[in-house]
Image (cartoon, helix red, strand yellow):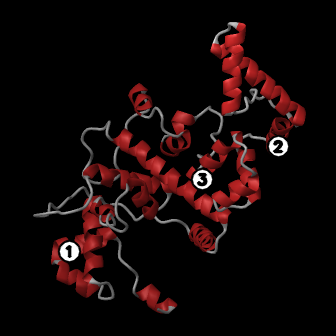
């Protein structure tokens, strides 16, 4: 539409739609804002009622997620900055929770145009084979899941939740701290900044691939082979170790020292005796009145000495 049309056909607020539907019916709202479809107007009216604390109960509501999943999705959307991230954090299907926001009188949570452009470029780079972009996306996805885990434990501590508006998070107390034990501090700080206030900034949680590369630091696999195994560049391997506080030079010196270290002496090799040697051992035992095993040891020692002289 042109700029004039945009000023004439200005989208209404949820409160205006809800008021007109209440006073004159949905058909009047459809006639008033004829450029909007019926579904959009119903969602706006629902959001307007929810903002006033009015919730209409439906006869039957079927959805593929629980009330706790819905709460995690909404709060994760606000914590992470978008509804898509909230859905991934809560583990619900994509676009299955869009109705949650108008039903609770909440605006949709969307990332800025700049963030959307950055996310799009990151996806393009990852699709083109950029290993750093792939690792960054993987790290972000794991952070989203960790934030969802924090919210799932925290929201479980709250009994009754309001029917509209934002969900209520528990107070920062001993019960909350105990419930969040073992979860990544970066995810906890995203939801509860007060819990991490005064502490040293936490490093980003490494991805699964980065954890595997870090675990291989103590081994003896070459950097090139390790990079090929995880489909990344050798420089990325060095960067992962450096970010984890591990020195690539110290690793090379360790492997060099291991290669130059003297090998432990090998056990003596006893040559295999043929039948004639066994017969000789038996004769020696009888003539010297010795045990057969003692005579066999003499023969083996003599055979080993002869083998050593030849080599």
Secondary structure found at label 1: helix
In the picture of the structure, the residue carrying the numbered disc 2 is 252
Quarter of the image for residue 310 reads top right
Closer-to-camera residue (245/274): 274
User: Where in the figure is residue 143, as x and y percent of width and height?
Assistant: 52, 51
User: Which residue occupies 42% across, 62% down?
Assistant: 83
| Residue 229 marker | none
Q: Nearer the viewer, mark 1 or mark 3?
A: 3
Q: Nearer the viewer, mark 2 or mark 1?
A: 2
User: Which residue occupies 47% across, 66% down?
Assistant: 110
- Whether pointer 1 and pointer 3 mark residues with C-beta atoms closer than 8 Å, the reply is no
Bin the neighbour count of mark 3 within 10 Å (Cα to Cα): few under 14, some 14-19, many 20 and up.
Answer: some
For the C terminus, give its image quadrant.
Answer: top right
In this view, the residue farthest toward the top is 289
Quarter of the image for residue 227 reads bottom right
What distance separates the C-alpha of mark 3 from that of mark 2? 22 Å
User: Which residue occupies 36% across, 68% down?
Assistant: 95
Taking 86 as reference, is 34 left or right?
Answer: left
Secondary structure found at label 2: helix
Residue 14 showing in the rendered view:
yes
Secondary structure found at label 3: helix
Bin the neighbour count of mark 1 within 10 Å (Cα to Cα): few under 14, some 14-19, many 20 and up.
Answer: some
Q: Compare marks 1 and 3 and give the one earlier in the sequence.
A: 1
Taking 286 as reference, is 109 left or right?
Answer: left
Closer-to-camera residue (178/303): 303
Q: Compare marks 2 and 1 and give the one earlier in the sequence.
A: 1
In the picture of the structure, the residue carrying the numbered disc 1 is 21
Q: Compare marks 3 and 2 and give the one earlier in the sequence.
A: 3
266 to 135, vertically: above or below: above
């Amino acid at each position: 539409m042109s700029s004039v049309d945009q000023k004439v056909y200005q989208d209404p607020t949820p409160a205006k739609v809800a008021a007109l539907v209440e006073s004159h019916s949905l058909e009047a709202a459809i006639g008033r804002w004829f450029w909007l479809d019926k579904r959009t107007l119903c969602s706006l009216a629902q959001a307007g009622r929810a903002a006033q604390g009015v919730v209409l109960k439906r006869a039957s509501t079927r959805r593929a997620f629980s009330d706790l999943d819905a709460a995690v999705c909404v709060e994760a959307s606000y914590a992470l900055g978008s509804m898509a991230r909230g859905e991934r954090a809560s583990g619900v299907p994509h676009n299955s929770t869009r109705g949650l926001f108008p039903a609770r009188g909440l605006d949709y949570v969307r990332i800025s145009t700049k963030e959307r452009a950055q996310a799009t470029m990151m996806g393009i780079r990852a699709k083109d084979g950029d290993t750093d972009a792939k690792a960054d996306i993987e790290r972000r996805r794991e952070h989203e899941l960790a934030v969802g885990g924090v919210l799932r434990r925290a929201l479980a501590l709250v009994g009754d939740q309001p029917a509209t508006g934002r969900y209520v998070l528990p107070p920062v107390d001993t019960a909350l701290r105990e419930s969040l034990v073992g979860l990544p501090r970066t995810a906890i700080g995203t939801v509860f900044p007060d819990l991490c206030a005064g502490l040293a900034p936490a490093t980003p949680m490494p991805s699964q691939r980065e954890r595997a590369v870090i675990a291989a630091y103590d081994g003896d696999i070459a950097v090139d082979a390790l990079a090929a195994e995880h489909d990344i560049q050798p420089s990325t391997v060095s960067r992962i170790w450096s970010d984890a506080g591990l020195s690539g030079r110290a690793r090379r010196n360790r492997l060099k020292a291991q290669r130059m270290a003297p090998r432990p002496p090998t056990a003596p090799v006893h040559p295999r005796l043929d039948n004639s040697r066994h017969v000789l051992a038996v004769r020696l035992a009888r003539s010297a009145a010795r045990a057969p095993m003692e005579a066999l040891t003499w023969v083996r020692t003599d055979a080993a000495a002869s083998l050593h002289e030849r080599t």
